[in-house]
Amino acid sequence: MKLTREEVLKIAKLARLHLEEEDIAKYQEDLGSILSYVEKLQELNTDDVPEFQHAAGGVNVFREDVIENCDADVRRRAIDNFSEREGNLLKVQAVFENRTE
Amino acid sequence: MDVSTLTIKEAGEKLQSGELTAVVYTQSCLDAIAAGDEDVNAFLSVSETALEEARAIDARRSAGESLGSLAGIPIALKDVILVRGWEVTSGSQILEGHKAAYDATVVSRLRAQGAILIGRTNMDEFAMGSSTQTSHYGVTRNPWDHTKVPGGTSGGSAAAVAAGFVPVALGSDTGGSVRQPASLCGVVGLKPTYGRVSRYGLMAVGSSLEQIGAITRTVEDAAIMLQAIEGQDPKDSTSAELTNTTVPSLIEKSVDGMTLGVPKEYFASGMDSRVATVVNEAIAELERAGAQIQEISMPHSKYALATFYIIQPAEASSNLGRFDGLRYGYHSGGENLHETYERTRGEGFGKEVKRRIMLGSYTLSAGYYDAYYRKALKVRTLIKRDFDVAFKSVDAIVCPTSPIVAWNIGEKLDDPLAMYLADIYTVTANLATVPGMSVPCGFVDGLPVGLQIMGKPFDEYTLFRIGATYQDRTQWHKQTPN
């Protein structure tokens, strides 16, 4: 099995990954061969088998709805990691582009 | 005193008695790393405050304070566990320069017990791989043979202990990443039951699969480490309340009354027959020690790798969505936000990581979700049931950790599936959430072989009993590379 170039580019777009032109063919092959391998699960009849949902046992964990403040040192260190900032705010490119109609 | 072969237990006794100080111990480890790590590349960085921490421990002890069994013990941490102030990168370029803002819960616990945090060990990028060759920061070499891989993804941690740089290192195990490198490096590697150790501060890759684990020279040391780091954590909703799970400090070195299951599917063709011979001899030793050996069948084992390679990439594709070049790490700007995401991630992630993100995105996407992801979740239930059935008749399962011994650096890199097959015996424990431990049990061509022991959820004590009994009767764990 081999994925088409279009399929790989579509997945890359969904995953927000820019791929180099010279790598695309290899990804087509690699992803194709892995997908072929995992096809073997189709050998099993799982009609009456429930999905494995909760590695931790499926129990909801709650706490009181009370604000737990962030430690000031942790906050400072987190903000220091920002690629671009204004004061304590993370600065990013526009999510929605300006349009004039 | 040559401290390079001390176990945590032995070192702890010497530190308590004053025969050894934390400063001397820490300095010896730092010297060993400076002298020997250029050949191995186990460490990505060494802590600048380790000696200061050691001095503080010695001062407290001199002042008469009674300290615990980990006080003054040097510990290395895989580059995927957050230590406040350290650059932690998950072996990836995309986190180059990222300084951890807080300590992982396991790190807080280790600090509170006075352990000395020595440094960060190398790993496959984002804990994906089996050989510690995909790190952006270089390849780690097996201390037993520098032309061979140490296994992965906790290859740096396993190499650091095998080379005698530190007595213990923490790793993470999503599909075998603590057990398999431990096996290839001739040391002990423990993956706890899912939920036993907090994942807060462990960079998430396969959230329903992974646990922080310990790599040590002896089973008794692994037990000491587990007790030190385990416990329910309000910051990790998947961590479990532990009841009746205390491990006595003196582990009973006896397997009397135990029945050990040997799953025939774990001795399938395709594995190195010499590895099978060595593992079978280890099982025979346990039989001589008094255990009953019973052949069992775990019929869905052959689907485990396929199940894992759907679930893990799916979870990883979701977990790695947070790396956008904005809040931490590598940034490659584009004309607009979308392009910034694509460039940062395309450039910052290595090929294997991109492969798995794409695989996960594909199997989770509309039209494919049912056939792949939901199907894999159902087969995961069947794999878990194999264990439930097995544990009705046996107390633990014994089998190989790895189908092969360490291979040449550079091999299998072009063929992802060939690399994935290295995990064939370890992914089952992650899928089923059960504990697993690898114990050194011999050599093939001078390269270490590991015996894997898997147990019932939260029954690590049985694994420790079996492993400690085995180490009481054998000397494999005392051998070191020259």
Image (cartoon, rainbow, N blue to C red):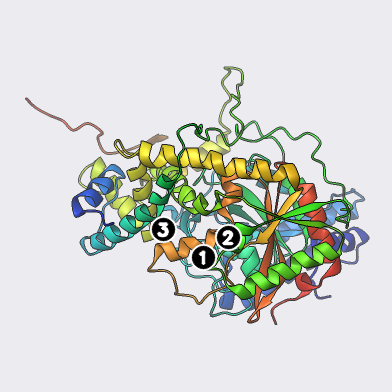
| Chain letter for the residue marked with disc 2 in the picture | B
**Label 3 environment density (alpha carbons within 10 Å; few <14, some 14–19, many ≥20):** many
- Residue B76 vs residue B386, the one in the foreground: B386
The front one of A84 and B228 is B228
Residue at position x 48%, y 56% from top?
A: B128
| x then y, percent, for residue B436 | 67, 52
Residue under label 2, please give it. B154
- On residue B93, which mark appears? 3
In the image, residue B111 above or below residue B378: below
Of the 4 image quadrants, the one containing the C terminus of chain B is bottom right
Residues behind callouts 1 and 2 on a single chain: yes
Image height check: is A28 above or below B336?
A: below
Per the image, the residue denoted by label 1 is B132
Q: Nearer the viewer, mark 3 or mark 1?
A: 1
Can residue B280 be seen here? Answer: yes
Q: Earlier in the sequence, mark 1 or mark 2?
A: 1
